[in-house]
Amino acid sequence: MKSIFHLFLVVILFSFLSPLVKAQTKNDLKEIEKRFDLNLEAKDLKAWMKQLSSHPHHVGSQWDKKNAEFIASKFKSWGFDTNIEEFYVLFPTPKFRLLEMVKPEKFSAQLKETILKEDQTSNQTDEQLPTYNAYSADGDVTTDLVYVNYGVPKDYEVLEEKGIDVKGKIVIARYGGSWRGIKPKVAAEHGAIGCLIYSDPKEDGYYAGDVYPAGAYRNDEGVQRGSVADMPIYSGDPLTPFVAATKDAKRLSVKEAITIMKIPVLPISYADALPLLRALDGPVVPDEWKGALPITYHFGPGKTVVHLKLEFNWDIKPIYDVIAKIQGTEFPDEWIIRGNHHDAWVNGASDPISGQVVMMEEAKSFGGLLKTGWKPKRTIIYCAWDGEEPGLLGSSEWVEAHADELSQKAVAYINSDGNERGFLFAAGPRDLQNFINNIARGVNDPEKNISVYERSRARLILNGTQEQKKAALDKKDFQIGALGSGSDYTPFIHHLGIASLNLGFGGEGGGGEYHSIYDSFDHYLRFVDSTFKYGIALAEVAGHSVINLSEAEILPLRFTDFYEEVNQYLKEVIKLADDMREKTSTQNKLISENIYDKYSDPSKTLIPPKIEEPVPFINFAPLQNAIEKLQQNAANYAQVLNSFKEKGILLTQDKEKLLNENLIKTQRALISKTGLPRRPWYAHQIYAPGFYTGYGVKTLPGVREAIEQRNWKEAEQQIEITAKALESYSDVISEAVKILKSE
Amino acid sequence: MKSIFHLFLVVILFSFLSPLVKAQTKNDLKEIEKRFDLNLEAKDLKAWMKQLSSHPHHVGSQWDKKNAEFIASKFKSWGFDTNIEEFYVLFPTPKFRLLEMVKPEKFSAQLKETILKEDQTSNQTDEQLPTYNAYSADGDVTTDLVYVNYGVPKDYEVLEEKGIDVKGKIVIARYGGSWRGIKPKVAAEHGAIGCLIYSDPKEDGYYAGDVYPAGAYRNDEGVQRGSVADMPIYSGDPLTPFVAATKDAKRLSVKEAITIMKIPVLPISYADALPLLRALDGPVVPDEWKGALPITYHFGPGKTVVHLKLEFNWDIKPIYDVIAKIQGTEFPDEWIIRGNHHDAWVNGASDPISGQVVMMEEAKSFGGLLKTGWKPKRTIIYCAWDGEEPGLLGSSEWVEAHADELSQKAVAYINSDGNERGFLFAAGPRDLQNFINNIARGVNDPEKNISVYERSRARLILNGTQEQKKAALDKKDFQIGALGSGSDYTPFIHHLGIASLNLGFGGEGGGGEYHSIYDSFDHYLRFVDSTFKYGIALAEVAGHSVINLSEAEILPLRFTDFYEEVNQYLKEVIKLADDMREKTSTQNKLISENIYDKYSDPSKTLIPPKIEEPVPFINFAPLQNAIEKLQQNAANYAQVLNSFKEKGILLTQDKEKLLNENLIKTQRALISKTGLPRRPWYAHQIYAPGFYTGYGVKTLPGVREAIEQRNWKEAEQQIEITAKALESYSDVISEAVKILKSE
């Protein structure tokens, strides 16, 4: 108790002092920010978006290359040292697609999106990729259909309870509830031989709002394309894990590549799904499984037989990463990296061009600063990634290509992707939370006369959890999210342990254009951010972040926040084990007392769950001790910095250099050499995309997933490994304190 | 703390002893129950249901009278002293109904249900009442339409926030969220001039299950008829509150009758609602407002103009209550009353005939016992009510006609209504909770080899709240619900303070036939309880209840349970005030800090709530003291009974009589002379139907509703009145203890 109270005081004191920069420098920085902002112009965003989204520009298309070249030429024109790095990746595209119902009635799925006169680019049919899931298997299957809700593991528990087996069947899952790639993976694990994924209007259609072109939301023929590579194993080219997909890289065969799906998978619209779902019989599904189609949702199987046939061109295609540098003057070997992808599934005005043009505008503004003679202290690298959509290909291959250098030099990576009107959202390790909050306090919401911090605060007060509401009322920093996957920060943070931030505005520009031909300039202009004001706001947030990182005297990390973060996760995993223990014990008791049989309706099937092994008590002590140590070291560091500040002590440049080189290592310390069980590419011990959630983050992933999977031995091993990572992080902080105190 | 622990011990001990009857008598009772059960035959239920539901038999129809006469003849044949009591009630029926959309397109609502070949009685069009709401006003209005969700007060808060006013408009509300009569009442309070109520498929249609005739659920043309009289003011004939609607009763004019709706109201199907809702514009509604129609739900108003014209025949019609008695031998002036209504909206196989035939079967069985020479100790009265559907007319008028005698003599009233397959549900004052649990322990579930108590226990363990689950695991009594309104127990408990139980099985026979032409014999047989086994189970539960009440040596009331009940309510109302105080204070702070303005999307309307008067601290002490006293008296009574039991002390018959006459007064003590504010007919201080929920119960209604309405002065007045009622109840218990202890 005592030490926590002590820490609490320190945190309060410290919150007024971070990021710690000398007073003089702070004014300088504010001046640079002001000059940076003056260069930003919304009209650029509009013009570049129009240009970059004028044609479909997926991997392998002519416009993918053209766009990369356009972006590179711009970066060059602004004075960046620019080059295009090419990689050669497996990128399957459809050769043949067929989906039909053969029983109880004939129905052939349309599998295409309608050209709309209200959408100028929707008619570029020849250039558009058909609706499909990249890295689906080839296949030709005809069999019964079963509805599996979101198709996540707990949905299969419900099926089991009803006595329904998907073995040898085709499943139909709705989008949502997990990243799409989880659905065919789990289906295949349960023996299914095909998988359809459809957009239910509940999550993605008229339930949310009026449909396109009347409104922004997905119409009945809109289809969500997307990758189904098993990215929770590794991201990047499926054929070249751990190494760059250079021209002559050693490649796996398609068969050997474990991230390629084992069964055929096809995404469909709700117009195509409706006849199939309507024809299903079997019991009625529970309420949580029901979508917004005007039918009674049934599990199947029964009389509904479906034929799915898919063939792909398994081609290697070039991708084009645009890499643009401004050399740092004082610390050229400390890199601040900023990235956003440029490839799209189709025209991609929102995803990714709305973010891409913001990044370009930042670069243009830095170009303007360079012309006035300004130079950054650290090296700034702007990256326009290719191949994000199929599997974070451009960023992953680049990270793998430059792994050693990045591990040495990267201070931080700042990512964005699509951007819309609304509130600032940020995610990253929580030692950057205070940093990004301070940035947010210095950027104005373009439609309100308040800072974006204040705007987010109002949102949390009115719409947050009780905890968020309380923190916001107390004017504390808003809490940033933990990073799972879903954009190009993945290889940086998860593979190499580079401190990463993901930034964007959202919440007031909702729509259903995602990965369809309707993600167009016309759609963006009408519904997402017509004035591009929120694009400019993002340029300010990301640009100020780059400036403050590149110019910081002492890198703005607040370790006490990180302690609070991991301590919270520790509590969660302990509670997870406790709850499972309690639940298993109760459940076993109910089973042995026949409560399920007593309850069940004899006219319906209810298969009671099986007796499970009791949950043992797990030794969390190594983690508890490591986190206790982290708390002390984080508090120490805060205290020393604070005392320097109070006494007005300035650091020598050498000491600063030494200190910052050390601070960079904190996030790197959280990487384990062995990586996570069964997926060594994911090496970060605090965050990972969930093995069964995909985009959704799992924190303390080794420990948490071992418990979830009831693997008690592995849980204890992972506790040891994670504790070691946290100890290393603590040691870096302790070293930083030594440097500060040294003569 | 001490006294609670003490009480706890007593409760545990006592739970094995109640209902307290001498050992010999208990065996006798078991023997009577067994003989009673042997007389029960499912084939009777089927035959009588077929007969009674063969034609529409609403108030005023020829089959309403014929059915009453058939039921009366049966009761007579079983040896009951039977008569039909007639009353003369206002019963409006449609003369003209028109609903059309005039803008933005023409659409005329169908307003009728389709004849189905799968449903033999669905073609009795000439005899069916059209789809309508009884006690709607006449009206002819043409104006804009606004969607108001369930149309309850908090929905209007949402509308206000969006800047939408229903003044001078027609509202369309979906069924659900409250009793239907609340919707037009609240709409009129907000200035609306017409009200449509439709069945959304989310609550009542394909969302729940396959629709009729394929499945049990409401199809797109099914309409829920029903009363919209303002029954939370008083039930029974709108023209004769407080007095019986005899031929020559003094009547109010229709204009004077405050329970008649002030605006025209019409129930419609979802087929008729769809074009209207689809045409609405204005902002998209929040998720909680969305139904299961395949549209984007909008608030309106806008371009949608609707014309609603309704005219009614405002006729006085006779109703026929069948009243059948078996005179008690020992205590003829102590009445056990059993009732179920016989009138329906149309054919009413489920509602009410499934309950009516159960009650008849019980009577037949008692007839069999009478033939063997058995006679009840107390008088048993079986009642088949007419006019329940329009407004609990038959029961309310009978109760008003016999109020004095009932107040003197009624021991308890046992009600049922529609019955289906599934689990036993019971509601009533909690001093009867242990009694009905013990009855449930002695009746077998007809499809499982366990008691209906055990079956309910399994349900609560698997589907109950955490609290219910825990209680069920500990094999405690399942908690019975508190009585709101919605069936014929209302005048008994709420107007006169007669201990009432509402019993029925349900949960495994769900459907959407309610108040439509499809509530038919065909529907019941296919979907609700094909074998009538659960009808027999209800006959056992209700029959055993009658037997155990009529034969009890000491009436089986457990006051310690009642103490726990009201103590729980006390905690709730204190928390209600505390939460409101906190919420008001926070909200006022947010308003004064402009948080709503900071949050709002400038492209949308968001009107911040208004500053509200702070919630004062309220003096709950009178209620707290009364409940403390109740706790002591209840524990005393339990202790004395227990010591008698332990010592084997038997009561003299005189003492028993004195004691029971006293015990009957407990529930009566909870009636206040003045009744509830603005609705004096509702006199019970612990339970009432909610002024703004209708069927939904409000416990400690005077206090709770005053707080909810922010009427602090009235809250304190009601605390005094309710405390007095509880003190009177306590005094009766204390008197009972004196009688027990007297020489």
Image (cartoon, coloured by chain):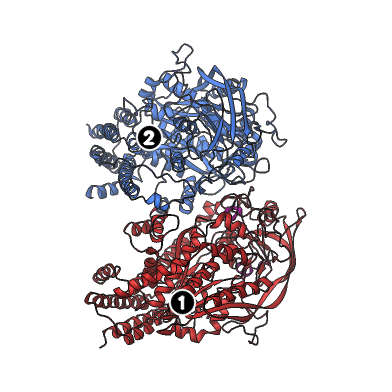
Chain colours: A red, B blue
Count of marks, rendered view: 2
Residue A667 visible in the picture:
yes
Q: Are marks 2 and 1 on the same chain?
A: no
In the image as oriented, which residue stretches furthest toward the front?
A372
B490 lies above or below B243: below
- State which chain disc 1 sits on: A
Could you say where residue B61 lies in the image, as x and y percent from the top left? 60, 21
| Residue at horizontal 49 percent and vertical 45 percent from the top | B452
Magenta stretch: includes residue A490: no
**Quadrant of the rendered image containing residue A369:** bottom left
CA gap between label 2 and label 1 equals: 78 Å
Q: Amino acid at mark 2?
A: Tyr
Span of residues in magenta? A183-205
**Quadrant of the rendered image containing residue A276:** bottom right
Q: Secondary structure at mark 2?
A: strand
The crowding category of the residue bearing disc 1, from other C-alpha atoms within 10 Å (few below 14, some 14 to 19, many at least 20), is: some
Q: Which mark is residue A370?
A: 1
Q: Amino acid at mark 1?
A: Leu
For the C terminus of chain B, give its image quadrant: top left
The crowding category of the residue bearing disc 2, from other C-alpha atoms within 10 Å (few below 14, some 14 to 19, many at least 20), is: many
Magenta stretch: includes residue A195: yes
| Residue at horizontal 31 percent and vertical 25 percent from the top | B673
Could you say where residue A156 lies in the image, as x and y percent from the top left? 58, 62
| Residue at horizontal 39 percent and vertical 72 percent from the top | A32
